[in-house]
Image (tube, rainbow, N blue to C red):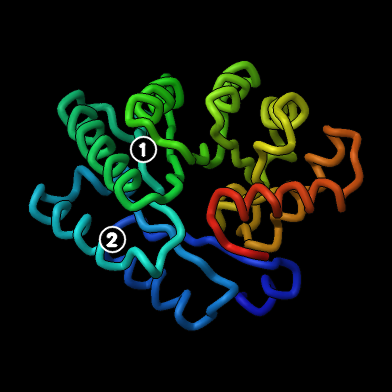
Amino acid sequence: MVESARAVLKRVVTSGVDPGDAEKALELADSYPDFIFVSLGLHPIHVVELSDHAITDYEDYISENRMRIVGIGEIGLDYYWIRDPLKIKRTKEVFKELLELARELGLVVVLHLRGEGAIEDGLKFVTDADIRKAIFHCFTGKPQLAMEICEEGYHISLPASIVRSKTMKKVAKKIPLSALHGETDAPYLSPDEDKRNVPQHVKVVYEEIARQKKSDLSTVEDAIDANFERMFGVRL
């Protein structure tokens, strides 16, 4: 799969979203230097599975591997899977800790914000933490909310499932190209919901953005490349 992706893409960022996943992500990046890059974080659904001590150890692990990563993520809030008020409270506390870690390390944050009100809450957390660089991953909110995010200087990432979403298409049309990214979230959110997603399907996102912007594909690709370099500090 990696070689197929390399035939289409210049660079890939993969996320380690819990301690075991983080080790695998770093090993994969070591196997494909200058192609696969890593962000390390703690997905909110894993926050509730770990003890405070385990989370502290993992935060130390992220700090120790600062030079091997390009971002902190996925981190955030999930009101879709997590409904218990006490568990939500804990995910918010850990989210704040991870935002502080990202600020200390000078890294972009990749945000997972799912469920009613999660994007709005996440935006407030990020601005309150004085985070300078953030990407709202797999953005599913309305265009007006996307504009509010962009006005704060943050970026929006749209997945390959954009081809099946009128709202995502409206977001792609409304917000500046200078604030957009493309992603797949593979193996999820495939352009064909009956098939497994793959990284090279990010081309579908670029093509849809070009259609919504009434622009040519090369202009969109160049702009998103520049956004990627600016956010992750990786040269293409």
Label 2 CA crowd tier, 10 Å (few <14, some 14–19, many 20+)? many
Residue 187 showing in the rendered view: no
Q: Dot 2 corresponds to which residue?
A: 62
- At 65% from the left and 45% from the top, the residue drawn is 181
Name the kind of residue labelled 2 in the image. Answer: Ile
Image quadrant in which you'd find residue 125:
top left
Q: Dot 1 corresponds to which residue?
A: 76
- At 91% from the left and 45% from the top, the residue drawn is 216
Residue 16 showing in the rendered view: yes
Label 1 CA crowd tier, 10 Å (few <14, some 14–19, many 20+)? many
Where residue 12 appears, as percent x and y from the top left, is 59, 64
User: In the image, 206: left or right of 70?
Assistant: right
> What is the residue that sits farthest to the bottom in this orientation?
31
- Relative vertical location of residue 122 with respect to residue 71 in this rendering, above or below: above
User: In the image, 101: left or right of 152?
Assistant: left
Element type where label 2 sits in the image: helix
